[in-house]
Image (cartoon, grey):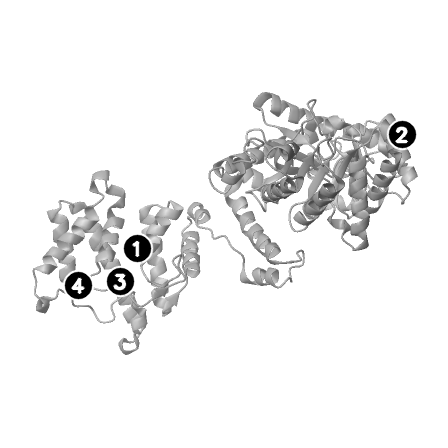
Amino acid sequence: MKKRETSPLPAFDRRRLKETIHFLTREKQTSEEKDFPERVVQMVEETLATRSEDELPSEVELKTFVVESLHVLNRQDVVAPYLSYCRERESVYQKLQAAVPKNEISASLSNAKILVGPTAQDEYLPWDSIRIAQALEKEGAIPAGIAREVAQEVEKKVLDSGCDTITTALIRELVNSELFLKGHRYYLNKQSLLGIPKFDFNNILYSRHQQTTIQGIASLTEEISRSTLRQYALEEVYSQDAIKAHLSGAIHIEGLGWPVKFFMLSLRPPFDSVFGNFSEPSEWLVAFLADLQKLSSFVTHSVDLYDVDGPHSFLDSTIMRAFFTGISRNFTTSIPCRLILQNSPNAFTESMYQFYQEADKVGKSSFLPHLVVPFKKSSLYSKSLGYTNNVCQMALEMHNVAFLLKQEAFFSKKKDPLAKCVMDSIVIDLVQAACKAGAKQIELFHKEIKNVFGVVVKAHLDKKRFLFNLSQGPLKEFFEEPFQSRYTIEEAFCFLEVSGLPEAVKYLCGQEMHEEEGWETAIQTLACLQDLCQSIEEKHGIQIKMVDYNNQDAAQRFQEIDMARFPELESILPPQPYTAGPHFKDDSPLEIEERLKREGELHRYVSSCVNLKMDNDPEKLKKLLKFAMEETSAIALRIVD
């Protein structure tokens, strides 16, 4: 076939003609006419077959053959769009000829020579604007007319550039630019590209990132994945209300970087299987640690193990020590593990204490899992006193032990974990809610809390809907054995945390939280949130539980956002991160016993630990534990740095 010199198009290309006809007739095709583009191509080929090789058609003649075929097939409605398309292509060529002297026009400007890559198939493909338009329709649900117009504008820019290769990433940027300039913001959002700028990628790769220390390939891939998934979560997982609230600092969605994971999962080790499927306890332990490691891949915060100190938990000290070793090494580069014990200090905690001492000698004590140890009156009896002393010593040195004073905060009446599956954890910025309401405006403050709580519910439902949609994809393994019978999305909890309670109180009433009006405001605030949680569960079955995970990152982020947004805070609050959880500020003038009493009262509304800083004095710690158990409403107590 005859071709125009330096033509941007071959005179006849079977695939191109078929795609062009399909594109022009897509909106008018019926299910019975899916083969219409192929029929047009076949008729043109039949016409060409009747001519000898010496009678190769020109582009004008080929255009005539296509029009005649459309008439024969009784599709006159396609003739005008086809001719218009041909004129637009000719216009591009004419502009190109006018811009470049004929003897300097490069053959690389030909569509057949402009290569696109890298593509999904890891190869170069010839330039084709039809492919761009089809991708816009398929990927962005963009109407055919807009897609065609954008593709043609992009093609003009590419041809005018004089390049001989172009990347798919650059094509996407040119397409997005056209969508932006033409005011198609809705479609632009659908076309957004997820990824990491090369500068940031190099910082991660070579450990120059200020907030991240990359250690090992697993850490590297995790950081890159988190960055990409966070972008996806902001654009696709959560509603606009939830994202707006997160970005403005009204709330903090803890798992935003891992929308495909749960926040926390609880697990009771199946010790009965020691006597069933495995001939040796060591075989059971290896299988259990493998399942535990697999489970940790679905979690962002922690895996809680319950009843690991039960009567049938371990047969001998050797297996027990192997368990501690496996837990420590498994979670060194993975998700932390907490051991929630059923019994007060006993032989199990003693074995862990000995393990801790040996690990500390080689500088690996920080790898030990966190312990939640029930503290009862019997813990101070002579039979258990030695065990209690050692656990207290570990708590003072390691800061990884919480003493549980009220077991109902963690266990149901049947001794089952209260929250086996926690989907997400969301923190509310109480200071921002107070600033929006205004000083002394307690009623408006509670109204603002209700508004923010509504967004929390939306965010939780967004996450639940997203994970449910993944249950037959990336999360399929999670809903198969051995985990299938333990966790369901329908019963998953949302944890609700608070940040800036004493700071919000200071802004609202001008008093510190330990003062009379300040204390009353703090109680009212937590009671309001508790009522909201109970109401949403009773009316809609949505389980939102108030807890305290001491989220310092959220507290720091809230403080930075609020100080920039509400300048008046500088004269009211000190320039430091907000207080995380239902706690007094670190510089509170309260004596330690009074602090225990006061914060214990707040535990009626929020499951929490009283955080205390104290010297390395086990005897003093035991006295405080006895006082907290007998004289306060505190749920738990822990020693912090």
Residue 406 position within the rendered picture, expressed as x and y whole percent measured from the top left: 78, 27
Q: Is any part of residue 485 visible from this angle? A: yes
Q: Identify the amino acid type marked 3.
A: Ser
Residue 523 position within the rendered picture, expressed as x and y whole percent measured from the top left: 77, 28
Q: Identify the amino acid type marked 4.
A: Glu
The residue pinned by badge 3 equals: 91
Badge 3 density bin: few <14, some 14–19, many ≥20, Cα 10 Å: few
Question: SS of the residue at dot 4?
Answer: helix
Q: Identify the amino acid type marked 2.
A: Tyr
Camera-side residue of 419 and 584: 419
Residue pictured at 16% horizontal, 58% vertical: 63
Q: Say which of marks 3 and 4 sits in front.
A: 4
Q: Say which of marks 1 and 2 sits in front.
A: 2
Q: Say which of marks 1 and 3 sits in front.
A: 1
Q: Is residue 177 left or right of residue 153?
A: right
Q: Earlier in the sequence, mark 4 or mark 2?
A: 4
Residue pictured at 83% horizontal, 36% vertical: 512
The residue pinned by badge 1 equals: 130
Residue found farthest to the front: 279
CA distance separating discs 3 and 4? 15 Å
Q: Earlier in the sequence, mark 1 or mark 3?
A: 3
CA distance separating discs 2 and 3? 95 Å
Q: Identify the amino acid type marked 1.
A: Ile
For residue 254, which numbered disc appears in the image?
Answer: none
Is residue 355 depicted above or below 91 in this figure? above
Badge 4 density bin: few <14, some 14–19, many ≥20, Cα 10 Å: some
For residue 381, which numbered disc appears in the image?
Answer: 2
The residue pinned by badge 4 equals: 59
Q: Is residue 481 left or right of residue 569?
A: left
